[in-house]
Every structure is written in structure tokens, then in C-alpha cells.
Image: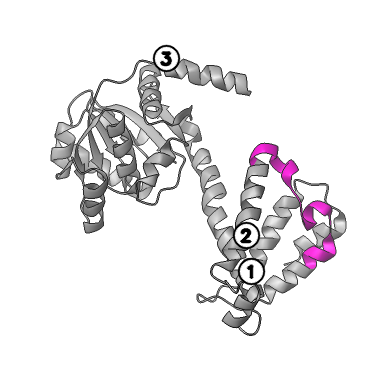
């Protein structure tokens, strides 16, 4: 959609009837659950109770949702009109089974999980007991502080529901939290989640590798003294991160605006000699604490993918095919 289409779409969603003020229960008080709970409270809903089993979860609940009671799962389920199951994907099926066994779920309870790769099918045991199933996944990373709730206002949410009524409710809830709802079909949830993991999680790995290589280049043979001498003011603190920050931020903004046309650097130029030199330097890096020496291989694989977005010459492809 173009910008005008986007505006009309969001304007149409804003005309959806707002959900009634709901009593919300959260399972569990992790980073995602407390962020959503706080956002829903800011929208006027009441987070009446949360499940918080670990000491860390209890502290987080007390800090982020101070008006909420910490209760066991059956009690939280019993009093909720909207039940949010915000547990890791691998734990979702077991928690759903716990909700079934609790036998406290009331008919017509809205039950929303936050697992990116799952749709509403996994909620079938609760749907059979009269629940209204929703899958609502914020495309955002969380750190466990108040900033998480602010970030929701910049996030899109993948929503999946059983019917148009469910979609209307899910979309309205997301809009109330300040986010942008995007419909993802049940059959496409895994691909959706894979794309997010590839773009965000692997970005963390990529930048961590780049910082490690850059630190080695800065430190040279003399370690810390060489790092301090590398700057005019002798400030070597987080120097690699300071070097990479503006460059990586600009590259991210450019690709989001321009797509693959934002590519620069030796692969985009078809410079096989420069890429070969890069690989040789990366292969000479000492192993990290875990004995890992695969930064060069990661570079090679990503450079091969990068070459796929360009008209790469044969000599460059030959360099990138060599392991």
C-alpha cells in the first residue's frame, strides 16, 4: 500500500468500536506480559491479577503493575475477561493445558497469546470451552523497563483471529495500546516470525561479531594502551560501538527506505580482491572464549547473499564460494 492507502487503512481502524473496559489477567509477568499489561492499563483497562512465579517476575510485576494482585493461575483465569498468555513459545502448549485443568475459564473470555509463530489453532482447547481466541504479537524487542511500553507505540502487532468479530476486537486493542495492527493468516505465522528473527535476532549477532573484530583491530598488539591512543582525547570506552553506531544506524535507515538499492561496499562494487582480503583478515582472528572462529564464515555467507542482490562478477562469486 502507498502512504495514502496506509492513512485510509489506519483511519478505518480508528473507527472500530473500542473494546469495553476489561478486567485483564496476565500469565506471566515477564517483559512482554508487563509491557502489554501496562499499555492496557494506560488505555483504561484494569489488570486485576497476574501470574508471577519467579522472584524476578514478582519484582517486575510489583514495579510495572503495582495495582495488580499476584495470584495463582486458576484465580487469575477465573477473574479475567481478557486473559493474556505471555509465555515463551515453547511453554505455550503447557500453559494452555494448565488453564484447561484449572476449570475456572468462563465462557466468552477473550484469550490472547503473544507467541509470534503461533496462530489461534493452539488455543483450540480453550476455544472448545467457550473462549474467544486471539493471537497478538508485538514486533518489538523488550528489556523489562518502562521503555517497553513506550516502544509499543512504535510497533506493529501481528493479529490473527477466528472471524471478523475477533479481528475487530484484536485490532481495537492494539490501537488502544498505540500500536499498528497487521493481519497475518494462521498459515503464515511461522514465516512471519522467521522473518522477524532473521532481521532482528541475527542483527544482534552480526553487530556483536563486528564489534569483536573491530576491537581486535583497535587494540593491536598493545591492548588497552593502543585503544586509548587511537582517539584524540584518549577515551577508548566502547570505542568499537561508537564507530559502528552512526554507520549501522544510517545503513538501517537507508535499507528501510531504499531496499537493496541502499547497498554499498566491496560486494556492491564487485571488488573480489577486497572481499578476499576481508576473509583472510577475519580468518586470522583468534578464537573467542567458546573457541568459535566462524566470523569469517558468517561474513562469507552473508556476502554471498548480498551478491544475490547485485550483478556480481564471476571472480567475486568464486571468492565467496570458497570455504
Q: Nearer the viewer, residue 321 or 79?
A: 79
Of pointers 3 and 1, the one earlier in the residue sequence: 3
Q: Position of residue 121 (x, y in %)?
A: 37, 33
Q: Which residue is mark 1?
A: 214
Give the left or right position of residue 107, taking residue 143 as reference.
Answer: left
Q: Secondary structure at mark 1?
A: helix
Circle 3/circle 2 CB separation < 8 Å: no
Q: Position of residue 42 (x, y in %)?
A: 30, 32
Give the left or right position of residue 9, taking residue 297 as reference.
Answer: left
Q: Quadrant of the C terminus?
A: bottom right
Magenta residues (range): 256-276
Q: Which residue is mark 3?
A: 15
Mark in the foreground, 3 or 2:
2
Please say whether residue 274 is one of the residues in the magenta stretch: yes
Circle 1/circle 2 CB separation < 8 Å: yes
Of pointers 3 and 2, the one earlier in the residue sequence: 3
Residue at the outermost front position: 233
Height in image: 48 above or below 305? Answer: above
Q: Which residue is mark 2?
A: 244
Give me the residue at 67% from left, 43% from top.
255
* Quadrant in which residue 5 is drawn: top right
Amino acid at each position: 500500500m502507498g502512504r495514502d492507502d496506509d492513512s485510509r487503512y489506519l483511519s478505518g481502524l480508528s473507527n472500530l468500536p473500542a473494546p469495553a473496559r476489561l478486567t485483564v489477567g496476565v500469565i506471566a509477568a515477564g517483559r512482554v506480559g508487563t509491557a502489554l499489561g501496562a499499555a492496557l492499563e494506560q488505555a483504561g483497562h484494569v489488570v486485576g491479577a497476574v501470574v508471577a512465579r519467579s522472584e524476578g517476575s514478582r519484582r517486575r510485576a510489583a514495579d510495572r503493575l503495582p495495582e495488580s494482585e499476584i495470584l495463582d493461575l486458576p484465580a487469575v483465569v477465573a477473574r479475567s475477561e481478557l486473559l493474556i498468555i505471555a509465555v515463551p513459545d515453547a511453554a505455550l502448549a503447557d500453559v494452555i493445558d494448565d488453564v484447561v485443568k484449572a476449570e475456572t475459564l468462563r465462557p466468552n473470555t477473550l484469550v490472547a497469546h503473544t507467541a509470534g509463530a503461533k496462530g489461534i489453532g493452539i488455543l483450540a482447547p480453550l476455544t472448545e470451552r467457550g473462549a474467544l481466541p486471539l493471537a497478538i504479537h508485538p514486533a518489538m524487542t523488550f528489556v523489562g523497563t518502562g521503555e517497553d511500553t513506550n516502544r509499543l507505540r512504535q510497533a506493529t502487532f501481528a493479529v490473527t483471529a477466528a472471524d471478523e468479530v475477533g479481528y475487530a476486537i484484536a485490532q481495537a486493542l492494539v490501537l488502544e495500546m498505540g500500536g499498528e495492527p497487521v493481519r497475518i493468516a494462521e498459515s503464515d505465522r511461522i514465516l512471519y516470525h522467521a522473518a522477524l528473527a532473521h532481521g532482528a535476532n541475527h542483527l544482534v549477532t552480526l553487530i556483536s561479531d563486528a564489534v569483536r573484530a573491530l576491537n581486535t583491530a583497535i587494540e593491536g598488539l598493545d591492548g588497552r594502551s593502543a585503544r586509548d591512543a587511537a582517539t584524540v582525547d584518549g577515551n577508548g570506552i566502547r570505542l568499537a560501538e561508537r564507530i559502528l553506531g552512526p554507520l549501522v544506524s544510517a545503513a538501517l535507515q537507508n535499507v528501510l527506505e531504499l531496499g537493496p538499492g541502499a547497498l554499498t561496499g566491496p560486494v556492491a562494487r564487485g571488488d573480489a580482491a577486497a572481499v578476499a582480503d576481508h576473509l583472510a583478515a577475519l580468518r586470522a582472528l583468534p578464537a573467542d572464549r567458546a573457541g568459535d572462529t566462524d566470523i569469517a564464515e558468517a561474513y562469507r555467507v552473508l556476502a554471498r547473499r548480498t551478491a544475490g542482490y547485485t550483478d556480481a562478477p564471476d571472480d567475486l562469486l568464486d571468492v565467496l564460494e570458497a570455504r
